[in-house]
Amino acid sequence: MAAKGNFFSVEECLEKYIPPEELGEVKRILYGREKDKIIELSAETLKIASENDFEVKGYRFEAEREDTRPSRIVRVGAVQNSIVAKTTEPVDVQRNAIFQKIEKIIKAAASSGVNVLCLQEAWTMPFAFCTREKTPWCEFAESAEDGCSTKFLKNLARQHNMVIISPILERDEDHGDILWNTAVVISNSGQVMGKHRKNHIPRVGDFNESTYYMEGNTGHPVFETTFGRIAINICYGRHHPQNWMMFGVNGAEIVFNPSATVGGLSEPLWAIEARNAAIANSYFTVAINRVGTEEFPNAFSSGDKKPPHKDFGPFYGSSYVTAPDGARTPGLSRSRDGLLITEMDLNLCRQVKDWWGFRLTQRLPLYAESFAEASKLDFKPQIVKE
Amino acid sequence: MAAKGNFFSVEECLEKYIPPEELGEVKRILYGREKDKIIELSAETLKIASENDFEVKGYRFEAEREDTRPSRIVRVGAVQNSIVAKTTEPVDVQRNAIFQKIEKIIKAAASSGVNVLCLQEAWTMPFAFCTREKTPWCEFAESAEDGCSTKFLKNLARQHNMVIISPILERDEDHGDILWNTAVVISNSGQVMGKHRKNHIPRVGDFNESTYYMEGNTGHPVFETTFGRIAINICYGRHHPQNWMMFGVNGAEIVFNPSATVGGLSEPLWAIEARNAAIANSYFTVAINRVGTEEFPNAFSSGDKKPPHKDFGPFYGSSYVTAPDGARTPGLSRSRDGLLITEMDLNLCRQVKDWWGFRLTQRLPLYAESFAEASKLDFKPQIVKE
């Protein structure tokens, strides 16, 4: 670890330089109470990770014992990865190369008992929306119900008794062949439980996604899986606290935030937003970002007055998990493929709700009315003048 | 700086131990782009601070120049302080001792050109709600319009051409003598512009505030002062993103969060919530927490199964400011009285709105409808089962 481009992670740097007696206080204030107990991963997991050159880390969040409910322990896997083949290769070649990488990471997760696993946003493809070109990128879109990535993951889900969240570019053949940014939820029995479409679409920097798809029309579904109630807030939706909130109102215990974002745009916000959502909504959040730099065939401009270029800088990884009490795991690295395994007792959600009371004190009717008022064309903001 | 109780601040620790080449990256990722330029404070300010033993810091957030709008530079002061007299002294003695301390801090702020200053929550009194005793604490309550603290501050506001936000315990004589937790906004001409009552009241730990006052009935007012559009989100309201959001919807450019909170309860959340609000709403936030340990005459229990005690641990200060792009100042200390002066160009708010587009993409009508649905007694959450 040294110079700028090479900087591995903040956590590694703190551990390296700050003396133990002060490091404890720094970590408590920055990351919350010491819940980031390391869990032992299986030898098989470590072997697969080593052979395939990806990072693997394991942490545990515990909860108090209760008289009337048994613990509900679940192991969650978060995957961050670079693409594999060049973006000039045929679509099938690019996709299959990623499938092969992901299959190994899923196997490593299964070997350490992961129950629910989430892949990164648009995991089957390069994040090509920067180009504003329609071909060949739209060819990566597929049916949520029976596209090739869904078929691929259904097998793995059944085989490993694992719920898999698969964020893809969806082709909606029943509605005029349009595209959506969609997370498919595949149950541990290998069935498609349903899907969620990204609610908030960016119009910033190189994230020209509104060129390809519209705001989602699937509401805020919570999927009641064998291993707990889960939901997905896709990428830019993390900037919208009201989006996080509705997943909480619908009863989510873990909300995944599969993302694709780059350093200059959002890195100082990354550790704040998903963590704030866990705090505000008394649930676990799992923030996932891809790694690597993706180079495209044709130069594109970035709306920043600079010369056109063929990439828009590295995705910074740093995937992490936050507990409902605000404690968080260290992040995966900023640059390597990685699998973050987090064991959590879902009972912690209700325990934190009872402690802090944010659902109790949220005054939902007040905000329903305020938001309705503010949506009117003749809305006058509540301004006080002297 | 050394052992636990004594730990001054995370920022000081990072500066002390991490080598410069890595410190730059750590600070960028943790605190945002280098906008925490130090501003020079007047000799008079430094003299008053030194003579009266309080910390004073000054930072600047700049914005891009625009063709059609001049810069709108404003200097904001945030004050954190301990109480002065023992809580066994008569109410007037306790209050006047605090007034004397605050008068000096306000003078120091004025000497460095502060335009808008905010005091901490319930600044005229010890944070006695832990006791659940009604006397003598309710005697600290006063009329927002012409109570003694309002009269005191009106003079200082006029004298120093300064907007002052004064969070007090309000006695509402026109409505049955009830109490409110209220922020009074005093304009730079020395007039009461209006007031805002705390929207969300805690029921957690030693914060038995619901024993004393109810949820506020003043909506989400934004005060259009000579120096910009300001609002106040009092203390526990910072845990509610929808509360922050409505101040943004009403057009706030700076939202103050005067608070009183202690380490064991909230310290790891402190750096997250007000900062997330600045990001999500494209405005400046000013988070203020008191310092010191307040001892009360009679032992009280804390609902934590531990023996009754006469204090509930130190308030941890750490007041800080976040810009709309998520960059933040270092915090004031965890233990000393302090004045944080931040110069900001309010043009940055709209620049960030144009850049990120969160107001554009917020889908207010969707959430108005979702919150209204979720408020109904027969609401069924959107749950998907296999």
Image: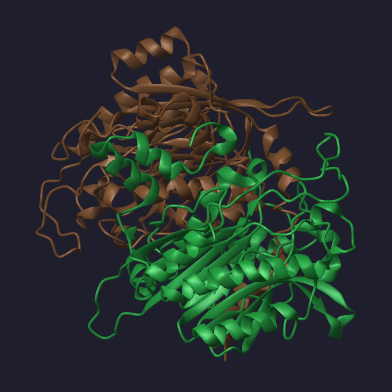
Chain colours: A green, B brown
Q: Position of residue B164 (x, y in %)?
A: 49, 32
Residue A19 relative to residue A172: left or right: left
Residue situated in front as seen by the camera: A155 or A332: A155
Residue situated in front as seen by the camera: B177 or B335: B335
Residue situated in front as seen by the camera: A208 or B316: A208
Figure label count: 0
Q: Position of residue A277 (x, y in %)?
A: 51, 60
* Residue B99 visible, this angle: yes
Q: Residue at x 52, y 24 (%)?
A: B59
* The quarter of the displayed image where residue B212 is located: bottom left
A177 over B325 or under it: above or below: below
Residue situated in front as seen by the camera: A330 or B144: A330
Q: Position of residue B124 (x, y in %)?
A: 32, 37
Q: Residue furthest front?
A: A51
- Which quadrant of the figure contains the C terminus of chain A? top right
A193 over A62 or under it: above or below: below
Residue A106 relative to residue A95: left or right: left
Q: Residue at x 11, y 46 (%)?
A: B297
B38 over A378 or under it: above or below: above
Residue A66 relative to residue A161: left or right: left
B237 over A219 or under it: above or below: above
Q: Residue furthest top?
A: B43
Q: Residue at x 63, y 43 (%)?
A: A263
* The quarter of the displayed image where residue A61 is located: bottom left
Residue A82 relative to residue A71: left or right: right
Q: Position of residue B70 (x, y in %)?
A: 76, 25
* Residue B380 visible, this angle: no
Q: Residue at x 35, y 41 (%)?
A: A15
* The quarter of the displayed image where residue B224 is located: top right
